[in-house]
Amino acid sequence: MSGWLAIVGLGPGAEAMVTPEVSTTLAEATDVVGYQPYVQRVAPRPGLVHHGSDNREELQRAQAALRLAAAGRRVAVVSSGDPGVFAMASAIFEAVEAGDPAWRSLDIRVLPGISAMLAASARVGAPLGHDFCCINLSDNLKPWPLIERRLRLAAEADFAMAFYNPRSRARPEGFARVLEVLREACGSQRLIVLARAVSTPQEAVHVTCLGEARPEMADMRTLVIVGSSRTRRIERDDATPLVYTPRSVPWSS
Amino acid sequence: MSGWLAIVGLGPGAEAMVTPEVSTTLAEATDVVGYQPYVQRVAPRPGLVHHGSDNREELQRAQAALRLAAAGRRVAVVSSGDPGVFAMASAIFEAVEAGDPAWRSLDIRVLPGISAMLAASARVGAPLGHDFCCINLSDNLKPWPLIERRLRLAAEADFAMAFYNPRSRARPEGFARVLEVLREACGSQRLIVLARAVSTPQEAVHVTCLGEARPEMADMRTLVIVGSSRTRRIERDDATPLVYTPRSVPWSS
């Protein structure tokens, strides 16, 4: 059997959200490659080699995975959530484009997963039920002014917004600035959802408004959703409020 | 056992992309409710009642599902893809907010699915690997000028864009206008992916540029992705080109 490379999404955490095609592929792999905590989600078995690496080493990891597949191994590159959203798929294709031309002939597949934004949205209702955007708040790989520019344009377009990587130890001040920009552009009453580690034992979901949101409500495992001007909150007795964005926008608006 | 309502995503089409939690829930349901073609994806079995209805009847369908759950039935409301993205979840919560206050106490869960945009993105590479937006191009429920406004702002923000419902028999001219607006805002060389019925036997994926794209390349089963200015195409011998958006934006841009 010749080698292949599958870039697979493990979903947000729960086994019950891993698709059968991903499970089957993991069962056929000889090598699993990725960020250490994600690689550890794949159970050890005879014949499977785990290659866990540190964060921020995506490009070297991608090259190593491509070399393994070119050597005939069956390689699963794992990401949390969906591999195409701020995850390993782009890193692999960057490596393919810049690397050995023979890598273009490899059998490379991307197998989608339940993304963090869809899992977070489902937990509170349907805040992404109308037009929305999705922004990575980390400025590791792009200039900070571009992030602020996109926030302002997204607010002007009245998109709901999903944010990845809101806050890390290396950038404690970034998310505070994001909240400031959004309060200015959307007002303090705008709904915000802070969904940490959805579907894992560490899950914690908060629904509040921009005026009440504090930077320390998010860390690197939090997915943040800010509603559009139309997003609504339904109160419930003894349960988290529901948050959803209606399907329609009136013609007068 | 008391009633519940689960709003579940069936994914883009292939059984192998239906999550285990959705399969388990469907196996426990007494009633499956939804648009007829999606309801038909759930195999008949003794004790399961199929309630298929026509398109554009989302709100009546939502109310019917809530009444069934309130009467003690175990109801699965099915959507293709993810139920929270231009699908049944928002319709259910609209019905909850406007309807019988007792509905707020029902056990209502949203179970995410592999969305059409993530499945389409995976098929060609990783075009949504950097910041992106997601817009429903149907003007059934919002004014057309708002769609054009969002397209222009999304182009200004340099988002990649995923489009749902590009074209239907009722609106044959809308997608032609979208292509015109985007050619003006992004130039004719900008990459576009037209992915029809991904993961089904009718799957057809085209990669081209805005200058070559024609309205008739899309129908109501097509998910359209337009790249950002940074999205790249990797040519391959004897295979569809790969399309991906790099993770980084240079500081000079």
Image: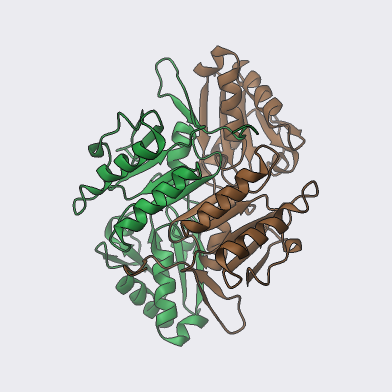
Chain colours: A brown, B green
Q: Nearer the viewer, residue A80 or A175?
A: A175
Residue A126 visible here: yes
Q: How many marks?
A: 0
Q: Is residue B169 above or below residue A89?
A: below
- Is residue B216 depicted above or below B63 in this figure? above
Residue A30, position as x, y percentages in the image: 65, 27
Residue B43 visible in the picture: no
Q: Is residue B176 left or right of residue B124?
A: left
- The quarter of the displayed image where residue B66 is located: bottom left
> x, y (%) of residue B95?
39, 76
Q: Quadrant of the C terminus of chain B?
A: top right
Task: Identify the residue at image location x=38%, y=65%.
Answer: A247
Residue drawn at point x = 23 percent, y = 50 percent: B168
Residue at image point 48% right, 33% down: B229
Q: Position of residue B128 (x, y in %)?
A: 51, 40
Image-based side of A66 in relation to B111, left or right: right
Identified at 39% across, 48% down, the residue is B151
Q: Please state the horizontal and vertical placement of residue B218, each as a whole percent of the image.
A: 28, 40
Direction right: furthest residue: A169
Q: Residue furthest bottom?
A: B101
